[in-house]
Image: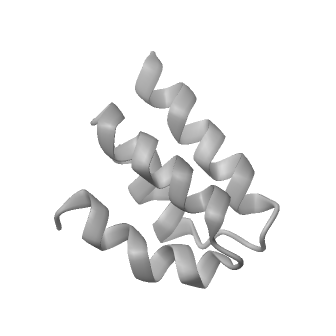
Amino acid sequence: GKAEGKAEAVLVLLGRKGEVPSDVESAIRAQTDTAVLTEWLLLAANVKTVGEFQEQMGSISGK
């Protein structure tokens, strides 16, 4: 579905910035809200490192 496709896109982008920890990958794959995934996609495109993404992804998911 749409969510899976977006999650995959986030992971591909992040993978180009470094090693994606399994817990981060799991959190991304578990996310079903496409609005959150869209924000994560934009975040993944703009961060320089996976760590930076990790620090900011929580504030987007509201958790």
Q: How is the image coloured?
A: one colour
Instruction: Kindly indicate the quadrant of the structure image that contains residue 20.
Output: bottom right
Q: Residue 45 appears in which quarter of the rendering?
A: bottom right
* In the depicted structure, whether residue 52 falls above or below residue 6: below
Q: Residue furthest left?
A: 62
Q: Is residue 42 above or below residue 60?
A: above
> Residue 16, percent across and down?
82, 61
Q: Where in the figure is residue 57, as x and y percent of width and height?
A: 39, 68
Find the residue positioned furthest to the top. Answer: 1
Query: Is residue 32 in sight in this rendering?
Result: no
In the displayed structure, would residue 57 be above or below residue 28? Answer: below
The answer to whether residue 5 is above or below residue 41 is: above
Observer-nearest of 15 and 23? 15
Q: Residue at image x 29%, y 62%? A: 60
Residue 56 pos. (x, y %): 41, 76
Quarter containing the N terminus: top left
Q: Is residue 22 visible?
A: yes
Identified at 78% across, 70% down, the residue is 17
Question: For the point 76% across and 60% down, which residue is it?
Answer: 15
Numbered disc total: 0
The quadrant where residue 21 appears? bottom right
Image x and y of residue 28, in percent: 45, 52
The C terminus sits in image quarter: bottom left
- Image position of 48 (left or right of 57): right
- Residue at 34%, 32% (x, y): give it: 34
